[in-house]
């Protein structure tokens, strides 16, 4: 259309439209037919458009403002929105100061929720996430607050497809789908062990990246959503929500079991279990809580049998009839995959009978007598089963209480610790109650023992995040051990009880070792070994437990100053880790192999076997590098690698300890380690990162004193500045308190090398007198005395030189007696004695 | 950064027909709008949802000296801001659509947009395309729509900016709506 034509249309339009509508036809009659058609179209417009446009512009304006895309938060730049949840919005972001532009998921608390309550919940979520470290769970990388005080979390970004989509695209068969699902189970079970219920398991929350290891997103939504759901059910995803969730009842681990069942259902069949047509509350309640779920074989007949049974047991409407843990569900799937009989039984008659029994068990027992002719035994069996069931129910209630209260209390408290304490204390009360009547049911004993174990770990388990209450932890492990002993005395050996019993001894001994009772610990590990070996004789060897045991034992032996025994233990743990990795292709087992090699390398270095140490450390680094390639986001792995590199450097050229004396080869290893620890520290804002960096800088500087004095001096200054910049609290650690001693000693050596022996002497004297009296650095002080002795002797002051050497010997002699196998101390003592002559 | 007073002076000069003043004024206004918009973005608050009008108003309040308040200046200022706001919002909507479809967004027919009911992004992009088409044959009325929707101006203000009577503006708007309606309803 041309502007001229439009002008004529416009004239005609106004001419006509300003008349009453009844005259329009007549007015148009005489017009040019070409214009007439156009004007008629315009006149027919009803004016619906303006309101629509105004509304649309407003909505886009709102969305443009709400969107934070392109904004910078902390050191992250937001790229685009990934999704919105109950508490906030998740963005794809990347580190702005990073040349690699690493992608992360950044979750920002929703605006308008910045009241105290929400902030507390958000922080609780952060604490929870920080406790989770599992390859199947998206990792927490960082956290902070925006300039306006809104908290945010930075999590690993998972670029993958939802479980079902992935399975369909890769055209996975049923077995492959099941194996993928087992990975998911493992991650959920891990969260459960840490007292976290996911609450919103669904295919969209389980992403499978191209590499094929599924990852769970946001497992700790639970502390957030529990409270929110009490005000309405719309926070959940009805297709995967359990009946108790739909009814607004307490959520426990078995609610996650249900959701996993629903996920498995969809993963196997491609159909959602209820095929809800709407999210109308009535329809949802009807389908989820009442209507019988159609078995998976309804969609795919080949699933008839085990898989129908497994899925329907996981999705049972009665929580008490489901698998009572994710492990049990996973076990049954494994049985199915291995062609062993599954433990789940189809519901139908047995279940109905069971229900009936519970209501009228006397009558039924009588009928049973009549029908089966197995009079007494049947009645007794029914009775016992009933007692056992009541116990199990109790325990299950405990689990529910535990988990539910964690979730509930945690969100209202600023710190999670008081709540966790309350939970552990309550759980132990319940456990004590249940343990009194555990009787001869090994299943129940094991279940209780594992719950004691969890409680003990929470109180003060070695190597797990805990409440810092080792005494209570010890007591809790002790109760479970006593229960297992009692069972053994009354009912003899049972494979799974032995296994649990052994594991509990390992836990208690590891804690003893950490508390300094190394000999007590070693005795405990021995008890554990006996029990686990007994178990191996009557069943499958408990490879995982044995592996763990020998790892702890080796570490205790290193502490006890017995590196040779430690090496033997580490050899066993490596062998077991490999067996474990062969049985269970779990990345954790691969990490264990690498970690065991690293520990062994350390022990070998300590006993003077440098070549062997280098070989072990090579294997450790190989493994760690492979793990890093698979998980480039993982800061802990980078830290592991850095520590391994430092051990290599120390074996090559530690200046004050026994080493190969290859200082020039050692420096590049230290360089590499420092680069790795810097990379790891960038990824996590852990204060420990800075401390480790300072430690590594000092180690490298000491070797540089031998090879490159100028650089050593500069490095000491750098380390000093780094330490000065650390927060007060961090500087209280043993290492940092004694760092000035190391630095001063290094500088004294530099003075001496530069031909300023008097300066060196003065510096060492100052150092020794300024040292804090609370100890922790005896070896370093002895080293300083030895050096002082050498300097004094060179200056011709033989009396003071002998005195200094005597001080060094006095410090080192008791140390050498306590750790007869330590080459480092022996060598220091020799040097001191030599200086004295 | 220009002083508020400069803006008032520039607006005045522009209203006197000084096109150079407009050239200086435009980037100042754009910058200020951006500044305010990002301020909103950082302390965005549920109760403070941004409306185009509110944003432009705030920019004007900051830039123009309040005691030298001049109705005509304000309307003109809004004229510049409306165009900029259109660009911001249309860009935003296009980006969102492109992400959704994995390709460039295409205009949808109005009927489809109405049926979906919740397709503001599509609608805004469609409006932008239509206005461009409309401006080719009737620049004045296209500008009128821009001022009304993206600038949030009242008919009185629009008539001031465009230098036409209010009644005329109302008449023009009716026609512009009719044109947009039939244009967007027509099969692409």
Image (spheres, grey):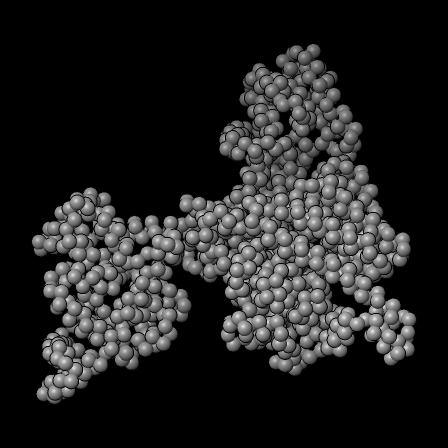
Q: Is residue A215 left or right of residue A564?
A: left
A606 up-or-down from A272: above or below:
above
Res. A595 in view: no
- The N terminus of chain A: image quadrant: bottom left
- Residue at left offset 11%, top offset 51%: B13
Viewer-proximal residue, B36 or A633? Answer: B36
A735 up-or-down from B101: above or below:
above
Res. A823 in view: yes
Q: Position of residue A385 (x, y in %)?
A: 81, 66
Q: Is residue A175 left or right of residue A282?
A: right
Count the marks.
Answer: 0
Quarter-wise, where is residue B142 in the image? bottom left
- Residue at left offset 83%, top offset 69%: A382
Q: Is residue A545 left or right of residue A280?
A: right
Q: Position of residue B6 (x, y in %)?
A: 16, 45
A4 up-or-down from A89: above or below:
below
- Residue at left offset 22%, top offset 81%: A44
Q: Position of residue A483 (x, y in %)?
A: 82, 51
- Residue at left offset 41%, top offset 44%: A147
Q: Position of residue B29 (x, y in %)?
A: 22, 52
Viewer-proximal residue, B103 or A566? Answer: B103
Quarter-wise, where is residue A254 in the image? bottom right
- The C terminus of chain A: image quadrant: top right
């Amino acid at each position: 259309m041309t502007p001229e034509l439009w002008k004529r249309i416009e004239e005609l339009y106004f001419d006509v439209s300003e008349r009453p509508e009844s005259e329009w036809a007549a007015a148009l009659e005489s017009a040019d037919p070409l214009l007439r058609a156009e004007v008629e179209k315009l006149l027919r417009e009803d004016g619906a458009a303006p309101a629509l446009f105004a509304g649309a512009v407003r909505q886009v304006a709102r969305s443009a403002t709400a969107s934070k895309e392109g904004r910078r938060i902390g050191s992250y730049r937001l790229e685009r929105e990934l999704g919105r949840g109950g508490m906030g919005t998740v963005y794809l972001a990347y580190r702005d100061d990073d040349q690699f532009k690493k992608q992360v998921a950044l979750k920002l608390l929703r605006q308008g929720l910045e009241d105290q309550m929400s902030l507390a919940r958000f922080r609780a979520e952060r604490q929870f996430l920080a406790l989770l470290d599992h390859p199947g769970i998206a990792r927490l990388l960082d956290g902070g607050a925006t300039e306006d005080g809104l908290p945010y979390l930075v999590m690993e970004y998972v670029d993958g497809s939802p479980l079902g989509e992935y399975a369909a695209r890769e055209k996975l068969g049923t077995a492959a789908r099941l194996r993928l699902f087992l990975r998911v189970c493992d991650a959920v079970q891990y969260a459960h062990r840490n007292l976290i219920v996911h609450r919103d398991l669904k295919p969209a929350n389980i992403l499978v990246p191209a590499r094929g290891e599924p990852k769970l997103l946001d497992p700790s939504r639970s502390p957030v959503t529990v409270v929110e759901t009490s005000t309405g059910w719309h926070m959940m995803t009805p297709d995967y929500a359990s009946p108790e969730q739909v009814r607004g009842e307490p959520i426990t681990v078995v609610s996650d079991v249900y959701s996993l069942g629903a996920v498995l259902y969809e993963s196997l069949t491609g159909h959602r279990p209820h095929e809800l047509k709407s999210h109308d509350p009535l329809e949802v309640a009807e389908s989820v809580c009442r209507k019988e779920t159609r078995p998976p074989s309804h969609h795919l007949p080949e699933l008839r049998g085990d898989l129908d049974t497994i899925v329907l047991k996981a999705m049972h409407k009665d929580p008490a009839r489901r698998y009572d843990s994710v492990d049990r569900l996973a076990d049954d799937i494994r049985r199915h995959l291995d062609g062993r009989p599954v433990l789940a039984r189809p519901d139908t008659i047995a279940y109905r009978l069971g229900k009936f029994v519970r209501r009228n068990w006397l009558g039924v027992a009588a009928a049973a007598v009549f029908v089966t002719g197995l009079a007494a035994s049947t009645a007794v069996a029914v009775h016992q089963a009933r007692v056992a069931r009541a116990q199990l129910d109790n325990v299950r209630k405990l689990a529910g209480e535990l988990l539910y209260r964690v979730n509930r209390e945690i969100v209202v408290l600023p710190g999670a610790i008081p709540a966790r304490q309350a939970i552990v204390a309550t759980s132990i009360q319940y456990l004590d109650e249940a343990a009194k009547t555990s009787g001869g049911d090994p299943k129940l004993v094991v279940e209780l023992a594992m719950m004691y174990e969890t409680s003990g770990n929470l109180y003060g388990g070695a190597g797990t995040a805990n409440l810092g209450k080792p005494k209570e932890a010890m007591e809790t492990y002790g109760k479970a051990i006593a229960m297992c002993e009692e069972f053994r005395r009354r009912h003899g050996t049972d494979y799974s009880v032995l296994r649990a019993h052994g594991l509990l001894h390992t836990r208690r001994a590891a804690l003893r070792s950490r508390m300094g009772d190394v000999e007590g610990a070693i005795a405990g590990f021995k008890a554990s070994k006996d029990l686990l070996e007994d178990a191996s004789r009557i069943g499958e060897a408990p490879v995982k437990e044995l592996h763990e045991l020998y790892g702890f034992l080796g570490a205790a032996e290193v502490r006890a100053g017995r590196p040779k025994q430690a090496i033997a233990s580490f050899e066993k743990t490596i062998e077991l880790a490999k067996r474990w990795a062969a049985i269970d292709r779990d990345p954790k087992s691969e990490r264990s192999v690498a970690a065991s090699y690293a520990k062994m390398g350390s022990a070998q270095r300590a006993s003077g076997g440098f070549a062997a140490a280098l070989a072990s450390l090579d294997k450790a680094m190989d493994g760690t590098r492979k793990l890093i390639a698979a998980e480039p986001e993982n800061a802990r792995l980078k830290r592991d690698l850095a520590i391994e590199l430092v051990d290599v450097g120390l074996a090559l050229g530690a200046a004050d300890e026994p080493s190969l004396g290859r200082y020039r080869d050692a420096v590049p290893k230290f360089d590499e380690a420092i680069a790795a620890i810097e990379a790891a520290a960038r990824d996590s804002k852990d204060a420990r990162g800075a401390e480790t960096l300072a430690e590594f800088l000092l180690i490298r500087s000491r070797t540089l004193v031998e090879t490159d004095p100028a650089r050593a001096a500069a490095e000491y200054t750098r380390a000093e500045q780094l330490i000065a910049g650390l927060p007060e609290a961090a500087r209280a650690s043993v290492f940092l308190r004694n760092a000035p001693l190391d630095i001063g000693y290094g500088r004294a050596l530099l003075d001496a090398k530069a031909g300023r022996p008097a300066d060196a002497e003065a510096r060492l004297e100052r150092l020794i007198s300024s040292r804090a009296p609370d100890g922790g650095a005896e070896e370093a002080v002895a080293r300083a005395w030895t050096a002082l002795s050498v300097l004094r002797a060179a200056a011709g002051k033989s009396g003071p030189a002998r005195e200094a050497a005597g001080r060094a010997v006095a410090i080192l002699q008791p140390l050498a007696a306590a750790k007869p196998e330590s080459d480092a101390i022996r060598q220091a003592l020799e040097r001191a004695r030599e200086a004295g002559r | 950064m220009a002083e508020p007073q400069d803006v008032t002076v520039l607006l005045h000069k522009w209203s006197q027909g000084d096109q150079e003043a407009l050239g200086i004024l435009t980037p100042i206004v754009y910058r200020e709008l951006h500044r305010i918009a990002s301020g909103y973005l950082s302390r965005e608050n549920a109760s403070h949802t941004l409306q185009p009008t509110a944003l432009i108003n705030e920019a004007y309040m900051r830039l123009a000296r309040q005691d030298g308040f001049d109705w005509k200046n304000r309307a003109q200022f809004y004229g510049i801001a409306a165009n900029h706001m259109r660009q911001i919002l249309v860009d935003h909507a296009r980006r969102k659509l492109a992400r959704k479809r994995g390709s460039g967004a295409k205009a949808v027919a109005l009927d489809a947009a109405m049926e979906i009911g919740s397709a503001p992004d599509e609608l805004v992009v469609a409006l932008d395309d239509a206005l461009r088409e409309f401006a080719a044959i009737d620049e004045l009325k296209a500008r009128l729509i821009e001022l009304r929707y993206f600038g949030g101006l009242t008919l009185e203000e629009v008539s001031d900016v465009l230098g036409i009577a209010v009644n005329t503006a109302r008449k023009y708007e009716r026609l512009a709506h009719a044109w947009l309606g039939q244009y967007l309803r027509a099969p692409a």
